[in-house]
Image (spheres, rainbow, N blue to C red):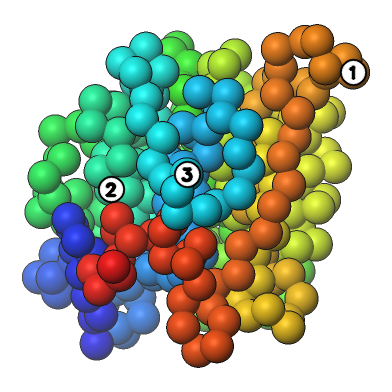
Amino acid sequence: MNKQFRFKQFTIDNAPPAANFAKQSLNNDENQKCGMPVSTDGVLLGAWSAHIYRQFRTASPSSLLLPSSLPVQLSEAEAPRKILDIGTGTGLLSLMMAQSFSEAKITAIDIDDRAIQTAQHNIERSPWADRIELIQQDIKKWENTEKVDLIVCNPPYFATGLQAQSKQRATARHTNELSHRTLLDCIAEHLAPNGLACLILPTEQAEQCLKSAPDVQLYPYQITQVKTVPHKATSRILFSLSKQAAPHSTQQSVPQCKHDEIIIKADDRYTPEFTALTKSFYLNMR
C-alpha cells in the first residue's frame, strides 16, 4: 500500500500511481516503491540545510536552533541560485529547497529509474515544477560546467551488512553504488568556492566522512548532533561542508566550525527547537 505524506505546501507519494509501472510487469508492491521513503531524517536535513545555508551566507554568529533565530532572510545576492540534490529519491529535499528558496534552480539527480518516476510524479504536482530539473544518471558520471551554491544529500548509510531484497531499497541504504569517499569527491567537484554541502549520517559514518573531507579540500562549517530523546545517545549527525578552511587566526573572515545539538522529542512532545526548525513544512506543526 502506498503511503502519502502531506506537507504544508506539497505532497509526497512514495510511489507513482500503479499505472506508471504497467509496462514493467511488476507484481511486488515493494518493487514499485522508491528505495528511500519519507523519514524524519530527510525532513530534518531539508529544514536544517535551509537554516544553516542562511547562517552561512549572512555570517550569523548564532549556532543554536532557537525559535527566535528562524528564519534568517537573505538578500538576492546571498540566496542560492543553483542547488543540487544528490540521490533525490522521492524528491523530498528538492521540494523543500524549492519552498525555502523562491528563486533557486534545482537539479535533482538519481541513478534509479523508479526513484526518478516517483520524484517526477511528486514534483509535477507541486507549485515549483518549473524550477526543478530531474536527471537520471550516476552522479559520478554527471558532467556539469556550472558549480552549485548548495548541495543537499541524504546518502546511503551502510557499507556492510545484509542488504534489502528490493534493489531500490538496497541502492538507497547501502554504499555499493556510491561510497562516502566517492560522494565527497563529487561534492568537491560540483560545489562552488563559496558554496555549502549539507548531509546527514549515523554517528560513526558521519565521523568517518568528516575525517576524510579535508583530503578533498572540504571543511566542516556546522555540526549538529541529533538525539531522538534527551536520555539517548546521538543517533545522527547533521553536518555541512564548505571549501573554506577554518582560520588559525580570528582576524580572518572564514567562519569557525560550529557545534550544537538538537533533540527531537522530550516529555512525549516535540521540542521547541525541532518545532521551530520544521514547522514551515510539517502539516500539523505550529
How far apart are the two marked residues, 1 and 2, measured between alpha carbons? Answer: 38 Å
Q: What kind of residue is marked 2?
A: Leu
Q: What kind of residue is marked 1?
A: His
- Left or right of 87? Residue 189 is right
> Label 3: which residue?
69
Give the label, 3 or 2, closer to the camera.
3
Q: Can residue 207 be seen in this view?
A: yes
Image quarter of the C terminus: bottom left
* Nearer to us in this view, 181 or 177: 181
Mark earlier in primary sequence (1, 3): 3
Instruction: Residue 248: give its label.
Output: 1
62 relative to 32, above or below = above
Circle 3 packing at 10 Å, graded few (<14), some (14-19), many (20+), is some
Mark earlier in primary sequence (3, 2): 3
> Label 2: which residue?
95
Q: What kind of residue is marked 3?
A: Ser
- Left or right of 43? Residue 33 is left
Give the label, 1 or 2, closer to the camera.
1
Query: Which residue occupies 19% across, 61% down?
Result: 8
Q: Quadrant of residue 113?
A: bottom left
State the image coordinates of residue 270 (x, y, percent, origin top left). Answer: 46, 76
Mark 1 touches mark 3? (CB < 8 Å): no
State the image coordinates of residue 94 (x, y, percent, origin top left). Answer: 33, 45
- Left or right of 17? Residue 37 is right
